Image (spheres, rainbow, N blue to C red):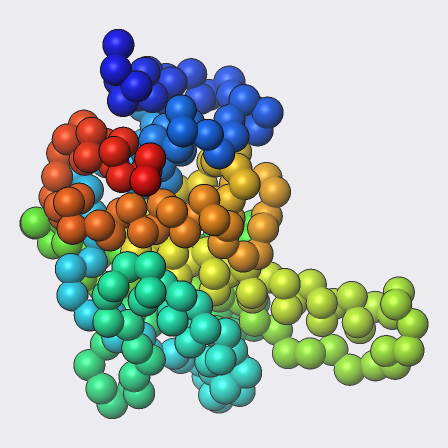
Amino acid sequence: MSKYLAALFALVLTGCATQIGARDSADQRLTMFSQVVFAPDYDSRRVEYLAKWVGPINITLKDRDTSFVEKHKGLVKSQMKSLEDLTSLPIKVVTETQPSNVTIYFESLAGIKQFTQTYAREKTAGANIDASGCHSEIDRNARHEITKARIFIRAERDVSGTLSTPSNPAREANKANRERVNRCVSLEMIRILGLRNSSDIVTPSIFNSTRYLDQTTVLDNKFIRTLYQPELKVGALRLDALKIADGLLQK
């Protein structure tokens, strides 16, 4: 049995797999790549065709009074530059008066839920905001090209108060808010590229559903770069795409 087929067979066993059972090895990378791009067998998220962007990504940042946009614009641009290098896609932030195909919404909990109610199309948006503080979704055309995306991120204002001791509640609240926004920007900007799924067998990775890393790892960057290699054609059947990815992931 080829290594590629063995990796596919391993997907059936992932329901009982743990973090201990999968590491960044040549034999596991294809399984993990398939998890985040296609989802495993018997998973309702599973897709059979490879989806990704084929043209420029123009990002608009929105909130209700511009304070969150100004605060987090630098973080978005930093992540944007990293993803541009990995994908070779032109990615830039544009003003609201310019055409865009990605919108990132920043707001406090009440505000971001209003944004999801107005603009999100997936029923899981509210639950995702409650669980992790963010949600993203993509639109695909008939050729499986990703054409639009929306990201919703909870971003609270800093809590004022005496910050002279490490255990001060205001300090802890501000730290938690900063870490949540950092992780959400990193993770959701990757997810809208076509790496849609989380899994506890993908490690070390920002896609790991239990470890909550707030930055991408070497493994994550390899997955992103692999997905956007020209050999992996948008709309390719899952099995055909994984045959090609198997070779790319060994490089």
Does residue 5 appear to the left or right of 16 in the view shown? Answer: left
Q: Position of residue 106 (x, y in %)?
A: 48, 73
User: What's the residue at 59%, 48% (across, down)?
Assistant: 212
Q: Nearer the viewer, residue 5 or 125?
A: 5
Q: Can residue 242 be spotted in the picture?
A: yes
Does residue 208 appear to the left or right of 48 in the view shown? Answer: right
User: What's the residue at 56%, 66% (across, down)?
Assistant: 181
Q: Residue furthest top?
A: 1
User: What's the residue at 29%, 46% (across, down)?
Assistant: 226
User: With respect to residue 112, does 212 lie above or below?
Assistant: above
Q: Nearer the viewer, residue 229 or 113?
A: 229
Q: Position of residue 9 (x, y in %)?
A: 32, 16
Q: Position of residue 2 (x, y in %)?
A: 25, 15
Q: Residue furthest right?
A: 165
Q: Can residue 196 be spotted in the picture?
A: no
Among the 4 quarters of the image, the one containing residue 3: top left
User: With respect to residue 208, does 246 lie above or below?
Assistant: above
User: With respect to residue 228, does 147 lie above or below?
Assistant: below
Q: Residue furthest front?
A: 251
Q: Nearer the viewer, residue 215 or 251?
A: 251
Q: Position of residue 143 (x, y in %)?
A: 8, 49
Of the 4 image quadrants, the one containing the C terminus is top left
Of the 4 image quadrants, the one containing the N terminus is top left
Q: Residue furthest left?
A: 142
Number of callouts in the render?
Answer: 0
User: What's the residue at 57%, 29% (across, down)?
Assistant: 19
Among the 4 quarters of the image, the one containing residue 11: top left
Among the 4 quarters of the image, the one containing residue 77: bottom left
